[in-house]
Image (cartoon, grey):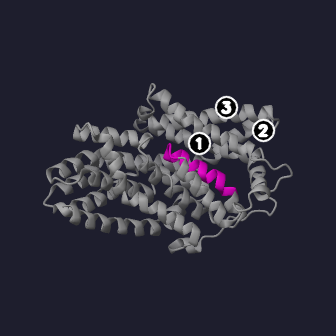
Amino acid sequence: MGLFSEGWITKTILFALLVGSIIRLLHVSAAVSRFVSYLNTKHKSIDSPKGSLLLAYFLGVVIFIESSITALVAGSVARPLCDKNGVSREKLAFVCDSTSAPICSLIPFNGWGALLLGLIVASTQSANALTLLITSILFNFYSLMVVVLVLMVIVFDINIGSMKHTKPHPIEPSAYSHDNPSPWPMVVPIVVMIAMVPLSLYYTGKGNILEGSGSTSVFYAVLATLAFIYLYYRLTQTITHKAYFEALYGGIADMIPIALILLLAFLIGGVIKELGTAHYLASLLEGNISPMLLPMMIFIVSAIMAFATGTSWGTFSIMMPIALTLGGNFELYLPLVIGAVISGGVFGDHVSPISDTTIISSMASGCEPIAHVKTQMPYALIVAFLTSLLYGIVGWIMV
């Protein structure tokens, strides 16, 4: 029961359940098939294997408000196109996951930026905290490189490791065809959900978006979207009252396995936290480490911590004060230190099987979480290796 005393955990699980209702409603109402038929007739360049993944990539880049919403929208919109064009759902999940947390960590004007800014202010007591955060974007090597890698994977169809053996989801040839093509039944609810996030951040932050609650905001956004879908679909006679609630409850039932996985992930993360694993890892940095190796070690320790706990934000909260204190003692360039913490947290979160973004990305894309982790891991490890080298080289140059 102590787990549910954490409001953000309860809201994240409810968010996952209600997202299932939105996905089911979009399918039952024929919004998805009408959307795909519209793209097939009006935008044939998108209706292709490469085009469907580029659509997911584009959505992941431009919707940088909150990582869960980013993955959800990109996966939900692009999944029918990927199914239709023979793209595996594991590859779609990789694109969604790799453009959620990495993109959000590169944008200072969202919930991520608010958290990081607060941690930097608390750790440095500096009036130039925003400048430090913005400058650190250049040193957030993992996020920068993984966003570029995903685009290369899409454009050049690069399949390595387990990704080479994935298969497209089988569908009927007529599954996504419709006599009345239109983008609006699908696009309008998605736009409402996206728009509700900053509005909710403004509300929960009492007039300051940067102080709003991310978990509460996405929960409010999903509730508002479900209410809007009911009104919109009933007014346009898209769906009956009975069909709406059947889809609502059916969608929740669809997501119960995912909610249980999330619940177990949070339980495991809580146990690891109680064991003091994160603080033990952080203490390893306080030994006799060469200053030029410190950025690389900060990245590695942050990555292990985020992987073990399944949370990048928790990692930032523990590592940022320690890393900035060490950086100040060794007179290191602080944006480099901040970038190393963020990169490590994002990488560990990216590949962790108990991360909420990992689970939500696989949920939105329609594949098993463990299959998503296995197929994504080789790409992420390549970028992480290059990131470690970069921190070693830059640390050697700047110290």
**Region rendered in magenta:** 64-80
Residue type indicated by callout 1 = Leu
Residue type indicated by callout 2 = Ala
Q: Is residue 383 above or below residue 30?
A: below
- For the question of whether residue 12 can be seen, the reply is yes
Q: Nearer the viewer, mark 2 or mark 3?
A: 3
x and y, in percent, of residue 136 in the image:
33, 51
* Magenta segment includes 319: no
x and y, in percent, of residue 306 in the image:
36, 53
Give the residue furthest to the top: 206
Of residue 265 and residue 387, the one placed in the foreground of this image is 387
* Residue bearing the label numbered 1: 17
Q: Quadrant of residue 237?
A: top right
Of residue 23 and residue 324, the one placed in the foreground of this image is 324
Main SS category, magenta section? helix
Q: Earlier in the sequence, mark 2 or mark 1?
A: 1
Of residue 101 and residue 312, the one placed in the foreground of this image is 101
Query: Does the residue at mark 1 contact the one at mark 3 (Cβ under 8 Å)?
Result: no
Q: Secondary structure at mark 2?
A: helix
Q: Quadrant of residue 21?
A: top right
Q: CA distance from mark 1 to mark 3?
A: 15 Å
- Classify mark 2: residues with Cα within 10 Å, few (<14), some (14-19) or many (20+): few
Residue type indicated by callout 3 = Ala
Of residue 118 and residue 245, the one placed in the foreground of this image is 118
Q: Earlier in the sequence, mark 2 or mark 3?
A: 3
* Residue bearing the label numbered 2: 243
Quarter occupied by the N terminus: top left
Q: CA distance from mark 2 to mark 3?
A: 14 Å
Residue drawn 52% across the image and 46% down it? 68
Using residue 152 as the reference point, say whether residue 241 is left or right of it.
right
The circle on residue 227 is 3
